[in-house]
Amino acid sequence: MREFAKGSFVLREAPRPLRLIYTGFLLLVTLGFASQLGFQIARIGLAPPAIALYYRGGEGTDVMTFPKAFGQLLEVSHAHAFMMAVVFLILAHLFASTATSGRFKTIVLAVTFTGLLGDLVGPWLVRYVAAWYAWLVLLSWFAQGLGNTVLVAVTGWECLAAPHGHA
């Protein structure tokens, strides 16, 4: 964290051991994102009717589910809000120190944050307001996935690339 305190921290210019630590973090975060996607596909589904069924309960094609209880949603929201905030904070700081343009950084960070926020709020809207908010959940997952992929890929590239001016 001391490196970030420097006003002109550039990731590509950071000491190699530090960039390797960040690369390890990115690999672990990628595994976390992959397991999240696996959960969403296997347990919930990627179609709005499946998302609505998961949160609101009802009869699906081969299963009957119960609506998610207030306490269940609160427990998941509590854990996710803290963990997603910490991961986003770290990824955003690393990404902000890359050589990409300020405009690109702003767009990627806004898309990612919007996806994260929708992922936290969407289940509540699906469960307690209307089933069609499942579209918001799906769009949020897409924005979150796209944004996190860009954050990890660009940051990873900067971590592994040679510093400017070196072969």
Image (tube, rainbow, N blue to C red):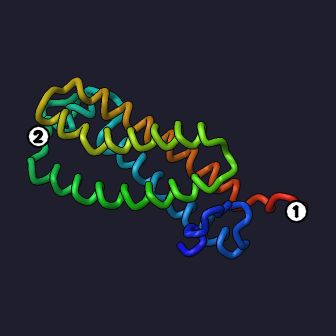
Disc 2 or 1, which lies upstream in sequence? Answer: 2
Q: Residue placed at 58% from the left, 53% from the top?
A: 95
Is 126 left, or right, of 84 in this rendering?
left
- Give percent across and percent down for residue 37: 42, 46
**Looking at the picture, which amino acid does disc 1 mark?**
His
Foreground residue among 94 and 50: 94
Foreground residue among 96 and 79: 96
Residue count near mark 2 (Cα–Cα under 10 Å), binned few <14, some 14–19, many ≥20: some
Residue count near mark 1 (Cα–Cα under 10 Å), binned few <14, some 14–19, many ≥20: few
Q: Residue placed at 17% from the left, 49% from the top?
A: 73
* Distance between mark 2 and mark 1 Cα atoms: 58 Å
User: In which quadrant is the C terminus drawn?
Assistant: bottom right
**Looking at the picture, which amino acid does disc 2 mark?**
Pro
Q: Which residue is mark 2?
A: 67
Q: Residue furthest top?
A: 132
- Give percent across and percent down for residue 83: 34, 60
Q: Eyeballing the image, is 37 above or below 8?
A: above
Is 145 left, or right, of 82 in this rendering?
right
Q: Residue placed at 44% from the left, 54% from the top?
A: 88
Corner quadrant of residue 94: bottom right
- Give percent across and percent down for residue 54: 21, 38
Q: Which residue is mark 1?
A: 166
Q: Nearer the viewer, mark 2 or mark 1?
A: 1
Label tally: 2
Corner quadrant of residue 105: top right
Q: Residue placed at 20% from the left, 30% from the top?
A: 60
